Image: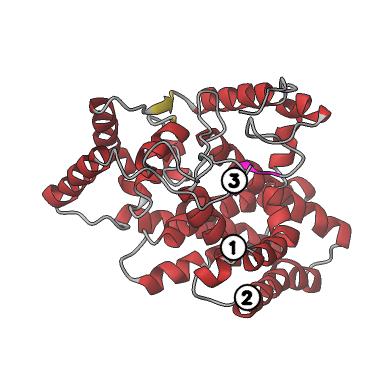
Amino acid sequence: MKAANPIKFASTQMDFFTTLNQRVNEYFKSNGIARQANGEMFIKTAAMFIIYFTPYFLILTETVTGTWPLIGLCVMMGFGVAGIGLSIMHDANHGSYSNKPWVNDLLGYSLNVVGGNAFNWKVQHNVLHHTYTNIHDVDEDISPRGILRMTPYGPWKFFHRFQHFYAWFFYGLMTLVWVVAKDFIRLGKYEKDGLVKKQKTTFVKEWLVMVSSKILYFVYILVIPMMVLSITWGQWLVGFLIMHYVAGFILAVIFQPAHVIDGTEYPLPDEDGKMENSWAIHQLHTTTNFANKNTILSWYCGGLNFQVEHHLFPNICHVHYRNISPIVEKTAKEFGLPYKSAPTFLNALWLHGKLLKELGKKPVLQVAQ
């Protein structure tokens, strides 16, 4: 349930984050490096756009033909969609890609280029998820209505007992749902909740940007291919669904184990809306790293296997997370705080499935306190 009053984190326990900030700042200062993107990030940015647009043009120019090669190109485009989201858009919309706002804004709109909506993402992710991580009914990332039960406080349905089996199928639908429906629904909800106004913009402006960008998206992803290629609607739809299914599945299995994983916590505010811990300590209790030694995964997923570092320092470009993670872990342990991490990606997925199974069990009714 939602707190009757605005949620407020504890203003005590500030020593941990103060100390951590000092140490992280000293790391950047002593090494003479900026918090934003570096050469590695620029190369990665180019690579992700190449992964997405190269197969698109190969299909459009009929350089590659044949059913299975074309399916392979659609799969590659799916990896490109996810890669743009994980490694470019994500940093840009956090304002951590560059110290120039216009660069962040421009690259942030790469989400619109692949069919999404940057404004909605900023509200759902930056405002609701990063501020109120794992708080039931506020953090929308753990509130997929009806189909999945991702918190112990969500309503239980009989089919949830099977969610650790069927969740993986629905994960693949994530970006498709965003593109055709969720963006429209969410923008209306954010306007109703006053979140659009809080971002110092208007519903009309954001609606026009969203609709116009989606029209342009479907022009290049649907209209142009149908005009220049000898394909049927059914063939186009199959390719479109394959691309988005791959992208959605990748994004889901990267994001979900960070917060919906065995050992995570779901703190609730009291009747006055007060949380037990400060914001930074709350992040440590609700966030989990995984596969921190896997350099290939780290490269592709935009460092989001370093979720603890990302949640504490969303304003730092992800290429620096690997280097500041020992500082974060050491400081957390000094203060007797958790630093949660799964050793491998497969282990994280296993622990995610384990929690889904646990949350799928019919809860035992308890007397309200």
Residue type of the residue flagged with mark 2: Phe
Residue 103: assigned label: none
Element under disc 1:
helix
Circle 2 or circle 1, nearest the eye: 2
Element under disc 2:
helix
Quarter of the view holding residue 257: top right
Instruction: Judge left or right: residue 165 versus residue 57.
Output: right
Where is mark 2, residue-wise? 203
- Chain part drawn in magenta: 140-144
Where is mark 3, residue-wise? 141
Residue type of the residue flagged with mark 3: Asp
* Image spot of residue 284 (x, y percent): 39, 34
Mark before the other along the chain sequence, 2 or 1: 1
Answer few, some or many: residues within 10 Å of disc 1's Cα (few below 14, many 20 plus, some between 14 and 19): many
The residue at 53%/68% (across/down) is 109
Residue type of the residue flagged with mark 1: Asn
The residue at 15%/47% (across/down) is 26
The residue at 66%/66% (across/down) is 192
Where is mark 1, residue-wise? 120
Answer few, some or many: residues within 10 Å of disc 2's Cα (few below 14, many 20 plus, some between 14 and 19): some
Asked whether disc 3 touches disc 2, contact meaning CB atoms under 8 Å apart, the reply is no
Residue 69 visible here: no
Quarter of the view holding residue 282: top left
* Image spot of residue 218 (x, y percent): 72, 69
Placement of 127 over or under 353, stated as above or below: below
Mark before the other along the chain sequence, 3 or 1: 1
Q: Main secondary structure of the magenta part?
A: helix
